Each structure stands twice: as structure tokens, then as C-alpha cells.
Amino acid sequence: MLQRTQILLDEETKRDLEYLSEVKNQSISKLVRTYLADKVKAEKKRARRKKVKKMSGVETLLKMAESAEKLAKKYKISGPKDVSSNIDHYLYGAPKKK
């Protein structure tokens, strides 16, 4: 079902629509509906393509780890080698285990 709406057009666009309406033997309303429908479909399709895929928590963590690895290689830095045995030290400041 069609719904009534109003739009404001600049003079040139209005003249162009009147001309096309006459040449194509279609009402201005029908021309506008057709052009808008085509444009909206195209924009909707473009928006879907741009939509970023939502990642799970695991995927996010893996991506962060990959980024950290790339930065470490780029700047030639590395983290501590004893993280697993001294996790409390690195997270909470507890004394290091030997």
C-alpha cells in the first residue's frame, strides 16, 4: 500500500522530473518511486557488504594475539618468558617465583 509523503525539490530537479514525466509518459510520482526504490536497494546492498562480521570472544582474542605478535616482530620486542609460572606477579604484583 502506498503512503503519502512530501519532499522538497530544487527547481532544476523539479524541471528535470517534469521533462522525464512527459517524455516517458509517466507521472512524476511514479518516476520518483522508481528512482528511490532503485537507489534504496543499491544502498541497502552496499550497507550489507560493509557490515562488519561479529566475532566470538575466542576469535577476538585470537585476532588480538595475532596483532600483538605482528607488533612484537615489527619492533623486535618480546614478553617475559616466565609468564605461566609467574602469572600472579605480572597480573597482581605478587613476588616472582624462582
Image (cartoon, helix red, strand yellow):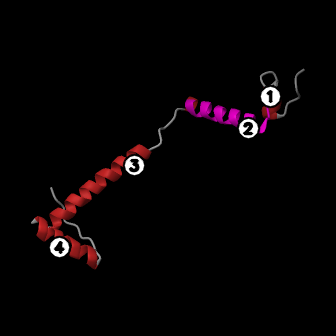
- Above or below, 60 against 22 in this view is above
Residue 24 percent location from the top left of the image: 12, 65
- Above or below, 37 against 61 in this view is below
Q: Which residues are magenta?
A: 59-79
Q: Secondary structure at mark 1?
A: helix
Q: Residue at x 20, y 70 (%)?
A: 17
How far apart are the two marked residues, 3 and 2, measured between alpha carbons? 34 Å
Locate residue 80 relative to residue 63 in the image: left or right: right
Residue 90 percent location from the top left of the image: 80, 32
The amino acid type of the residue labelled 3 equals Ala
Locate residue 28 relative to residue 82 in the image: left or right: left
Q: Earlier in the sequence, mark 2 or mark 4?
A: 4
Q: Earlier in the sequence, mark 1 or mark 2?
A: 2
Crowding at dot 3, Cα within 10 Å, few <14 / some 14-19 / many 20+, comes out as: few
Where, quadrant-wise, is the N terminus in this rendering? bottom left
State yes or no: discs 2 and 4 in contact (Cβ < 8 Å).
Answer: no
The residue beneath circle 3 is: 47
The residue beneath circle 1 is: 88
Q: Earlier in the sequence, mark 3 or mark 2?
A: 3
Q: Residue at x 22, y 76 (%)?
A: 15
The residue beneath circle 4 is: 18
The residue beneath circle 2 is: 74
The amino acid type of the residue labelled 4 equals Glu
Q: Secondary structure at mark 2?
A: helix
- Quadrant of the rendered structure where residue 8 is? bottom left
State yes or no: discs 1 and 3 in contact (Cβ < 8 Å).
Answer: no
Crowding at dot 2, Cα within 10 Å, few <14 / some 14-19 / many 20+, comes out as: few
Q: Is residue 68 magenta?
A: yes
Instruction: Look at discs 1 and 2 and give the one toward the viewer.
Output: 2
Q: Earlier in the sequence, mark 4 or mark 3?
A: 4
